[in-house]
Amino acid sequence: MSAAAILEALPTPWDETLLHDALKAIIKAYGYTHYAIFTIPSPDDVRAELKLILGNWTPEFQKGYEKLGLQRYSPVIRAVKAGPTPFVWDLESLFPDDEPTPTVRFLTANGIRGGVFVPVHGMSSFAGALGLYGERTDLSAREACELQFASFGAFGILAACRLEENRRSNPLTPRERDCLKLAMLGKTSSEIGIILSLSEYTVSQYLTAATRKMNASNRTHAVAIAAQMGYLS
């Protein structure tokens, strides 16, 4: 069964447990053992790391992954930010050194020799990726296309599951939300101030507060997080 067909068979209303089970079925169908859904950093995010939002990782695996800095591994970051094309990888290609590195030893010990990152770039500033990992080191063009379709479905289902909950727990004030919405449309602080009848200084204060609440590095990053979480809808 294709990845898209597995997601299509999910009963409604959706919830994250059902999506988690479907993604486990997908990795099994495609010969992988691990999956993760990430958000992709914005182009001007100085931290430039993938942020895990859902996966079947054990706490020990996640701790080791982050300790080795794999969420910041530059070839992967560049590939998933470059466009929508799935990025298929294997350990020999990413780590060609003859002597096994700590990263290679860690991944091998967890049964991972390769995988694929499937980027999802939205119409707004949001971007994410579905990562699948395991012993498999190859992927046909047809399978990559199937996973590309499924990745959009997975992100859509996850967004639907979290949207209502996020709306109820929205930490943004109405003015902070208004400012972020206009920033998402490319408006400057001065332009936002004119539209909302506020001073440029006040707009900057609202945007700074919203950025801090989103734990973001800048307003672009804050817009991306708030949009993804459903705070701006």
Image (tube, rainbow, N blue to C red):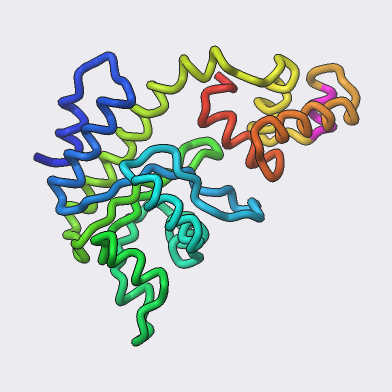
Q: Position of residue 187 (x, y in %)?
A: 73, 33
Q: Position of residue 100 (x, y in %)?
A: 36, 79
Residue at the extreme left of the image, as rendered: 1
> Residue 121: which quarter of the image?
top left
From the viewer's perspective, tell me whether residue 91 is left or right of residue 62: left
Q: Main secondary structure of the magenta part?
A: helix
Q: Residue at horizontal 37%, vertical 52%?
A: 61
> Residue 135: which quarter of the image?
bottom left
Q: Nearer the viewer, residue 55 or 87?
A: 55
Q: Position of residue 225 (x, y in %)?
A: 57, 35
Residue 63 drawn above or below residue 223 = below
Q: Residue at horizontal 78%, vertical 34%?
A: 208
Q: Nearer the viewer, residue 36 or 56?
A: 56
Q: Nearer the viewer, residue 134 or 147?
A: 134
From the viewer's perspective, tell me whether residue 225 is left or right of residue 65: right
> Residue 86: which quarter of the image?
bottom left
Can residue 102 be seen here? The reply is: yes
Q: Residue at horizontal 24%, vertical 61%?
A: 111
Q: Nearer the viewer, residue 121 or 45?
A: 45
Residue 191 on the magenta span = yes
Residue at the extreme bottom of the image, as rendered: 98
Identify the magenta region. 189-194
Residue 174 drawn above or below residue 102 = above
